Image (cartoon, rainbow, N blue to C red):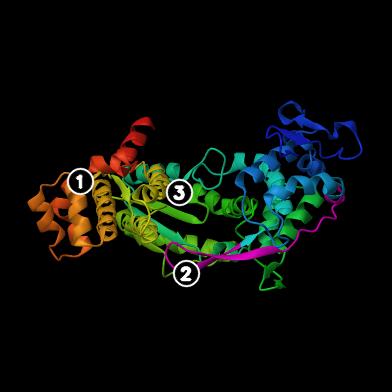
């Protein structure tokens, strides 16, 4: 596997301590002993542990980094662990005797409130899951629906948003917005494994996947068994979710519906409320009876698309709809900015901006499809006002404020009057004296990016 001294080499997994090939070799020159696309149905595990496939999986796990699992092993320790234990691990996988470790339970906040429970596998299990994922993706992905966009090679949320816009522009101006309640926690193992077994016949692979589904959850020093669900946090879970929900995609295609699905975020586009209500009733029945999933009736609705966000975006009411970001997406960004600025008291303003820029760039990159530019301009103005507010607080005393305003180019009379006006920081951050002293060009020189200009640039390049 990949060594610490050479990022482009791996150690031959099969030969560790037994064959001359155990020296580091260039993975790009290693011929695969077995191509999984041509593997016999009952030799799939050989394709999983194939050295070229494992090398790819190792590189992916190392690049993703991630937190340790229940055993505490870090990604950095994985290479040394594999040098010692890979031969035994490989033999156990080939014999169908490998049992995964419990996953470590971690709660993270949801964007809309509440928490989501993640299950973090050990790094060894992440490696094996990634190797499984690479093999199984080549089997299942080619037959997935064109309207499925989540966690697939060459597919993205931005493509789903573009397709949503096209469907509505074509006259399908009602949306059936389906919310699956706690989807990843309620996947029925038997139903899922039956769908995996349609294409996978190697019993060792099927047993291994079920063992990953049933691996316990380690929390508060206790391991809790799991009877349903596919825990988020491992590389394999998104593919398993797509395999199960592909039945929904095929049913919608059979009925001739326009739809978009990104993992468990699903919308169907129709031409009337009555048609939407029929789809909502029949599709809810299919999900609950055929797949034993639960539709959240409170969050699901038949509505106009401009009243329902999708993947952070929403649409205007125009006949030719225009994309903009949902209010919740803007609120989450503004909260992130507030948190950074809250930590900025007493810090150099350049450092604060350096911490903020990656957040703004990531947000602008995701929302580069936005057609409506005015809200982005308002966002830029709000960010600069928040920074001016922070600077005014840092100046603290009227004497310091007067001295700094003079240094930034204000005349003495105006600097004296502004520094002692008795108003609060938020009012002063918008006042003309602070706008003149700290114009946009001043922030540009410190490296603050414009969300509006970034979105415009990405829109032109795409």
Pick whichever of labels 2 and 1 is earlier in the sequence.
2
SS at mark 2 in the image: loop
Q: In this view, does 174 lie to the left or right of 95?
A: left
SS at mark 1 in the image: helix
| Residue assigned mark 1 | 407
Q: Is residue 292 visible?
A: no
Position of residue 37 relative to residue 115, above or below, is: above
Front in this rendered view, residue 345 or 271: 345
Q: Which quadrant, please, contains the C terminus?
A: top left
Q: Is residue 399 visible?
A: yes
| Residue assigned mark 2 | 114
| Residue assigned mark 3 | 260
Bounds of the magenta segment: 92-118
Give the x, y percent position of residue 72.
71, 60
Q: Is residue 245 left or right of residue 71?
A: left
> Of tags 3 and 2, which is closer to the observer?
2
- Rounded to the nearest whole Å, what is the CA distance between mark 3 and mark 2? 26 Å
Q: Is residue 108 left or right of residue 177?
A: right
Give the x, y percent position of residue 291.
59, 62
Pick whichever of labels 3 and 2 is earlier in the sequence.
2
- Rounded to the nearest whole Å, what is the CA distance between mark 3 and mark 1? 56 Å
Front in this rendered view, residue 34 or 176: 34
Does the magenta segment cover residue 382? no
Front in this rendered view, residue 243 or 422: 422
Position of residue 308 relative to residue 370, above or below, is: below
Give the residue at x 21% y 44%.
439
- How crowded pointer 2 is (Cα within 10 Å; few <14, some 14-19, many 20+) is rated as few
């Amino acid at each position: 596997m990949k060594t610490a001294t050479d990022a482009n080499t791996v150690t031959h997994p099969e030969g560790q301590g037994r064959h001359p090939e155990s020296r580091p070799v260039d993975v790009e020159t290693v011929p695969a002993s077995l191509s999984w696309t041509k593997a016999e149905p009952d030799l799939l595990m050989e394709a999983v542990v194939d050295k070229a496939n494992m090398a790819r999986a190792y590189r992916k796990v190392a690049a993703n980094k991630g937190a340790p699992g229940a055993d505490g092993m870090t990604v950095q320790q994985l290479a040394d662990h594999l040098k010692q234990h890979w031969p035994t691990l490989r033999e156990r996988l080939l014999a169908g005797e490998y049992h995964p470790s419990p996953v470590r339970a971690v709660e993270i906040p949801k964007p809309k409130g509440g928490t989501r429970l993640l299950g973090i596998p050990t790094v060894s299990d992440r490696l094996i899951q990634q190797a499984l994922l690479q093999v199984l993706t080549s089997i299942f992905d080619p037959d997935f629906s064109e309207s499925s966009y989540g966690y697939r090679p060459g597919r993205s949320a931005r493509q789903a948003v573009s397709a949503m816009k096209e469907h509505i522009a074509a006259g399908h101006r009602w949306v059936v917005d389906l919310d699956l309640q706690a989807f990843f926690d309620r996947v029925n193992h038997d139903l899922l494994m039956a769908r995996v077994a349609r294409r996978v016949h190697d019993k060792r692979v099927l047993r291994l996947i079920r063992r990953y589904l049933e691996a316990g959850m380690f929390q508060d020093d206790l391991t809790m068994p799991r009877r349903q669900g596919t825990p988020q946090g491992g590389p394999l879970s998104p593919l398993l979710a797509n395999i199960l929900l592909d039945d929904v995609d095929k049913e919608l295609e059979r009925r001739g519906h326009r739809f978009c699905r990104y993992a468990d975020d699903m919308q169907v586009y129709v031409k009337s409320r009555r048609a939407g209500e029929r789809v909502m009733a029949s599709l809810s029945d299919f999900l609950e009876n055929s797949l034993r999933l639960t539709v959240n009736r409170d969050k699901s609705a038949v509505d106009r698309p401009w009243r329902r966000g999708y993947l952070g975006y929403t649409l205007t009411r125009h006949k030719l709809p225009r994309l903009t970001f949902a209010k919740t997406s803007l609120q989450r960004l503004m909260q992130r900015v507030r948190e950074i600025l809250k930590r900025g008291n007493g810090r150099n303003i350049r450092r604060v901006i350096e911490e903020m820029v990656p957040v703004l760039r990531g947000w602008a990159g995701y929302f580069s499809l936005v057609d409506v530019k005015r809200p982005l301009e308002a966002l830029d103005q709000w960010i600069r006002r928040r920074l001016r507010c922070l600077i005014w607080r840092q100046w603290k005393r009227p004497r310091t404020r007067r001295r700094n305003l003079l240094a930034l180019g204000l005349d003495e009379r105006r600097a004296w009057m502004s520094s002692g006006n008795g108003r609060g920081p938020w009012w002063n951050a918008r006042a003309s004296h602070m706008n003149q002293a700290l114009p946009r060009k001043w922030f540009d020189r410190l490296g603050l990016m414009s969300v509006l200009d970034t979105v415009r640039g990405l829109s032109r390049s795409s």
